[in-house]
Image (tube, grey):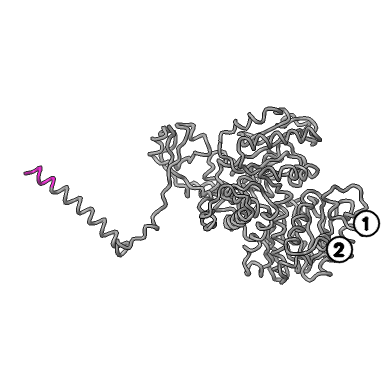
């Protein structure tokens, strides 16, 4: 009888509990038949980890630090190796953000967040995604320049791969030393022209690392699918050659045929192991950057960010500036464009702008006639014998030896672009001359870091009497002038390359074409709202960069599809490309881990 009563009691509790649950459900939804199942939290499939125990905690790709749940600690066999209290990702992020902000200098903040990068990649990228406007200048320009200068002394843990002149004939085997099989994006430098700092040799590795952090946070590419690379062929930097602690090869740079053989072996090795990976050339000096791009652009999925990325970003800024000045974007060919700097970046920008004019229907003569490009010797003219093929394309018949101010006075340019890495090059008289000949001059000092900018935002607004449309390569604070606040925006390649890489790799494009760059620029320019244009902004807010990258990726995929270059897309995916791209973008959140058997 007692046993029967206990059984009846248990049954009663079960049904009572079930009834309580149903009453709660009804109270929540009003009608369980109309429950919105889409509101349920999305299922996160577990990731199988090829490690266990303390090895998981030492691997930044898998480590969650104090956020590991107790079941995971048992399952992966490291219970007792962490403090008992579990912190959520939000708590961890708050703690790290306070630690970063506690540093008085930007380079101190860079050290703090990069230490996190080496411990916990998921949390690192979560911080970047949620605070990209604050942290992008810390992990990339302008702070990354100083980080590169200190790279050797700060080196503690390897990240990425190094291919050197000592590795000739070994690179095809070396690529298999990298543990990740599914590499989507590689950023490679030879350290010969790091920002405006010159030859930093192997210390230039900070650039690929910083770029790929933006690929992950802004472009939504998972961190195990990116690879930073430095090709070390020596350095011409005397300070590094005499530094007993320098980590690169201490001999003069290899040049000529031997140099190109080393780079070619690297490119072939990469294509052999990761045939669909995108290779981004970064900070190669001008005399090799264009030849390398010309040689590989038709046979490899690759692009040069300094030439093409800067060009596409600047094109987007020019299109946005035309809208901001009340002109139509199709009036690009009617502008008079003065470019200071005739290196790979300057000529790359001119080339992309020229191609955009042709795309808009202008003929070759009109498009070429819009450009006035000057280097340290003056305006590029046809009588000069020191020009390469790309520079000669934009050489003019007249204006021999003219400097910037004389060009501005004579030809009355409407757009001034600085790509010289020569800080303070734009003098007051140059800006005032432009403002006197143009109601709303467009002024873009694009060199990085901030110390290399051709002028500051404050100078540009002051010398143009507040009439200029301004954007710069490095960030500047808002400027107060005569009771009005001006909001300078950043013309930075990070608005283009993450989305370009995401789109090209998702669809499996065979190559990166000029029209993809043009469509990327148009997508970026179209992201601007009328309200932002009214404030004088010509680029979106940095905090919107993931949305910008999404739109750029969609534009790249549509162009690749129309050109017949896609290898991974289906027609169904193409029909809903925006939703499909969104579903493929990496979101840095913790997911359950289980040991791979």
On the image, which quarter does residue 276 sit in?
A: top right
- Quarter containing the N terminus: top left
Q: Along the horizontal axis of the image, is 358 left or right of 395?
A: left
Q: Which secondary structure is most common in the magenta stretch? A: helix
Q: Which residue position is annotated with label 1?
A: 400
Residue 153 colored magenta? no
Q: Nearer the viewer, residue 347 or 49?
A: 347
Q: Earlier in the sequence, mark 2 or mark 1?
A: 1
Res. 141 in view: yes
Numbered label tally: 2
In front: label 2 or label 1? 1
x, y percent for residue 210: 64, 45
Secondary-structure class at tag 1: loop
Binning the other alpha carbons within 10 Å of mark 1 as few (below 14), some (14 to 19) or many (20 upward) gives: some
Q: Is residue 133 visible?
A: no
Pointer 2: what residue? Answer: 408
In the displayed structure, 474 sits above or below 281; it is below
Secondary element under disc 2, as helix, strand or loop, is helix
> Residue 301 vs residue 454: left or right?
left
* Residue 480: % across, % down: 70, 66
Instruction: Count residues near mark 2 (Cα–Cα under 10 Å), then give few for <14, some for 14-19, many for 20+.
Output: many
Residue drawn at (78%, 48%) of the image? 344
Q: Which residues are magenta?
A: 1-7
Q: Nearer the viewer, residue 56 or 35?
A: 35
Q: CA distance from mark 2 to mark 1?
A: 14 Å
| The quarter of the displayed image where residue 465 is located | bottom right
x, y percentage for residue 62?
A: 49, 39
Q: Which mark is residue 12?
A: none
In the image, residue 191 above or below residue 131: above
Is residue 4 magenta-colored? Answer: yes
Residue 86 coordinates in the image, percent (x, y):
42, 43
């Amino acid at each position: 009888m007692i046993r029967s009563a206990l059984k009846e009691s248990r049954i009663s509790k079960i049904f009572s509990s079930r009834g309580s649950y149903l009453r709660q459900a009804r109270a929540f939804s009003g009608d369980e038949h109309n429950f919105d199942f889409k509101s349920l939290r999305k299922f996160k499939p577990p990731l199988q980890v090829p490690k266990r125990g303390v090895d998981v905690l030492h691997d930044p790709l898998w480590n969650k630090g104090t956020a590991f749940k107790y079941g995971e600690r048992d399952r992966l066999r490291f219970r007792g190796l962490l403090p008992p209290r579990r912190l959520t990702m939000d708590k961890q992020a708050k703690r790290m953000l306070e630690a970063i902000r506690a540093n008085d200098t930007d380079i101190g903040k860079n050290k703090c967040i990069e230490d996190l990068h080496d411990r916990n990649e998921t949390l690192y990228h979560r911080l970047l995604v949620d605070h990209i406007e604050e942290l992008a200048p810390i992990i990339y320009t302008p702070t990354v320049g100083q980080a590169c200068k200190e790279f050797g002394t700060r080196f503690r843990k390897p990240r990425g791969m190094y291919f050197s002149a000592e590795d000739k004939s070994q690179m095809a085997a070396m690529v298999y030393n990298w543990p990740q099989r599914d590499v989507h994006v590689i950023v490679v430098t030879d350290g010969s022209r790091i920002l405006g700092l010159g030859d930093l040799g192997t210390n230039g590795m900070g650039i690929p690392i910083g770029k790929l952090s933006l690929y992950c946070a802004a472009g939504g590419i998972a961190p195990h699918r990116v690879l930073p690379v430095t090709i070390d062929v020596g350095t011409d930097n005397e300070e590094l050659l005499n530094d007993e602690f320098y980590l690169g090869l201490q001999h003069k740079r290899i040049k000529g045929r031997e140099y190109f053989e080393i780079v070619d072996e690297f490119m072939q090795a990469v294509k052999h192991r990761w045939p669909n990976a995108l290779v981004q050339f970064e900070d190669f000096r001008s005399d090799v950057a264009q030849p390398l791009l010309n040689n590989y652009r038709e046979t490899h999925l690759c692009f040069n960010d300094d030439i093409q990325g800067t060009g596409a970003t600047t094109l987007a800024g020019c299109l946005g500036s035309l809208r901001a000045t009340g002109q139509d974007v199709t009036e690009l060919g009617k502008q008079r464009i003065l470019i200071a700097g005739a290196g790979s970046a300057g000529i790359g920008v001119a080339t992309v702008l020229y191609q955009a004019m042709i795309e808009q229907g202008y003929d070759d003569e009109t498009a070429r006639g819009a450009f006035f490009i000057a280097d340290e010797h003056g305006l590029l003219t046809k009588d000069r014998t020191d020009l390469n093929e790309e520079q000669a394309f934009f050489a003019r018949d007249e204006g021999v030896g003219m400097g910037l101010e004389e060009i501005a006075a004579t030809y009355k340019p409407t757009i001034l672009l600085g790509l010289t890495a020569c800080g303070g090059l734009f003098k007051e008289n140059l800006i005032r001359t432009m403002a006197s000949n143009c109601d709303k001059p467009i002024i873009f000092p694009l060199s990085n870091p901030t110390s290399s900018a051709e002028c500051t935002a404050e100078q540009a607004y002051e010398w143009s009497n507040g009439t200029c449309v301004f954007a710069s390569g490095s960030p500047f604070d808002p400027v107060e002038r005569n009771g009005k606040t001006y909001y300078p925006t950043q013309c930075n390649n990070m608005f283009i390359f993450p989305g370009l890489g995401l789109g090209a790799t998702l669809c499996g494009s065979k190559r990166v074409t000029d029209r993809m760059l043009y469509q990327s620029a148009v997508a970026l320019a179209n992201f601007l709202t009328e309200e932002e244009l009214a404030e004088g902004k010509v680029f979106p807010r940095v905090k919107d960069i993931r949305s910008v990258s999404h739109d750029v990726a969609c534009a790249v995929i549509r162009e690749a599809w129309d050109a017949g270059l896609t290898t991974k897309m289906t027609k169904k995916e193409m029909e809903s490309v925006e939703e499909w791209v969104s579903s493929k973008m990496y979101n840095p959140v913790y997911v359950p881990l289980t040991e791979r058997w």
